Image (cartoon, grey):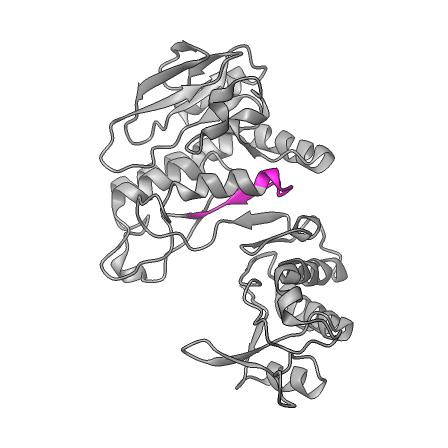
Amino acid sequence: YVNPYLAVDGPLYAEAAAQGFMVMHPTKDEPYVIDFGEFDCGHVDFTNPDAAAWFADTIIGEKMIDFGLSGWMADFGEYLPVDVRLANGESGMTAHNRWPALWGEVNAKGIAGRGQTGETMMFMRSGGAGVQGHCPMLWAGDQAVDFSRHDGIGTVICAALSAGMLGNAHHHSDCGGYTSLFDTTRDAELAMRWAEMAAFTSMMRTHEGNRPRQNVQYDDDPAVLAHFAKMTRIYARLAPYLRRLSKEASETGLPVQRPLFLHFEDDPETYAIQTSYLLGPDLLVAPVIAAGKSEWTTYLPVGAEWVHVWSGKTYAGGSHATVAAPFGEPPVFYRAGSADGALFEAIVSA
């Protein structure tokens, strides 16, 4: 884990401030200090090439990679105050939206400086134009631990598809969500449904959440743990397919998760769909994103026939299919005649 802030009571802050590496207060000759609630911190000024190089080498290189880390969450990057003074003379207002790209670049340079490009992987939540050139993986941020439409499990699909169409090839989320506020906590149903969705994305990763003791964890219950293990086996079975999609992404820019209209542009029904996606060209995934469901209905695009993975039943394109959706069998269809049909069928026995 790393973020672009330095706690004011730590030695790295003193080292950076002494060299003029922090963003500055608008009217005082001192670093701009941000109150994070539990502690105060300053923000390293990435418009200063020396400051960016120091962070890349000292923190990313020495403190992380040399220590033995090969992957991390590069958190934040979107909260540059708009009234700061920056080393290059730019206003905080104009620098704010491109700050995530600078943050991604610092991480990428730290990795490259240790010769670990392609071997060490970091992921970010902040983004915008330019991030794609530095960050190999996005995550959706801190979703609520619920099925809500405004910030729950379903919003991850919209985030992935939007990010993908902006050139971010890989996207994932915290399995089970992250944010518990007031009396909202993760239950077993949400944890299991989220794992089902995550198994059909670029990366499958858990998070205990911001209130671990109040939220269901995957190892709290034998049934939940067994379900999660099954989903990880399915994810592993799809590795050959995901590797090819990753190679395609690096060569063409096509994202791994794709809106239906990307491959079925002549079907007007696909343009408004926000609750299902294509994993590559041939696998249609329609996660269960509502509570209390034992079956699920999804639209299948015109231009192909679709085989329901779990039952083997074939459905015509241009129709809505309602299928059983017990835990462990998320609604997934593959394009009839796909060269990967045998691989997709094999997940049934995972």
Residue beneath the point at 57% across and 43% down: 163
Q: Depth check: 3 or 94 in front?
A: 94
The quarter of the rendered structure image containing the C terminus is top left
| Quadrant in the rendering for residue 93 | bottom right
Does the magenta portion include 162?
no
Q: Position of residue 153 (x, y in %)?
A: 37, 43
On the question of residue 66 being in view, the answer is no
Q: Is residue 1 above or below residue 9?
A: above
Which residues are the magenta region?
164-174
| Quadrant in the rendering for residue 233 | top left
Q: Is residue 7 above or below residue 169?
A: below
On the question of residue 302 being in view, the answer is yes
Lateral position of residue 90 relative to residue 303, left or right: right
Q: Position of residue 133 (x, y in %)?
A: 71, 49
Q: Is residue 21 above or below residue 109?
A: below
Q: Position of residue 27 (x, y in %)?
A: 62, 87
Total marks placed: 0
Residue beneath the point at 73% across and 77% down: 87
Q: Is residue 254 above or below residue 319?
A: below
Residue beneath the point at 58% across and 63% down: 77
Q: Position of residue 334 (x, y in %)?
A: 48, 18
